[in-house]
Amino acid sequence: MVSRLRALYQAVESEAVPQQFIDLLRRLDEAERAQSDD
């Protein structure tokens, strides 16, 4: 069971992060910074 979990974790870890998710994180970061400037 441990080897299966390790293999699953490694498979997920090696997947690329979708560009849409990166864009969402960037927009959230910008909104958070804009809110703290007020």
Image (cartoon, grey):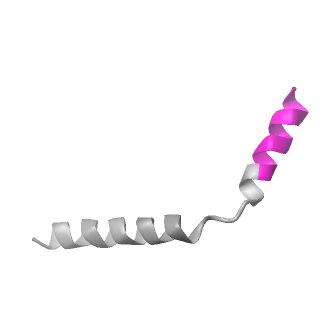
What's the residue at 90%, 35% (across, down)? 3
Is residue 20 left or right of 33 when viewed as pictured?
right
Is residue 24 left or right of 18 when viewed as pictured?
left
Q: Is residue 26 above or below residue 4?
A: below
What's the residue at 73%, 54% (across, down)? 13
Which residue is the extreme one toward the top? 1
The number of callouts visible is 0
Which residue is the extreme one toward the left? 38
Residue nearer the viewer, 29 or 18:
18
Point out the image quarter for the N terminus. top right
The percent coordinates of residue 37 (x first, y second) are 15, 73
The percent coordinates of residue 14 (x first, y second) are 76, 59
Q: Is residue 8 above or below residue 32?
A: above
What's the residue at 26%, 65% (across, down)? 32
What's the residue at 73%, 51% (across, down)? 12
User: Where are the magenta residues, as a range?
Assistant: 1-11
Point out the image quarter for the C terminus. bottom left
The part of the image, by quadrant, that contains residue 16 is bottom right
* Residue 14 magenta-highlighted: no
Which residue is the extreme one toward the front? 20
The percent coordinates of residue 36 (x first, y second) are 18, 67
Is residue 2 left or right of 12 when viewed as pictured?
right
The part of the image, by quadrant, that contains residue 15 is bottom right
> What's the magenta bit mostly, secondary-structure-wise?
helix
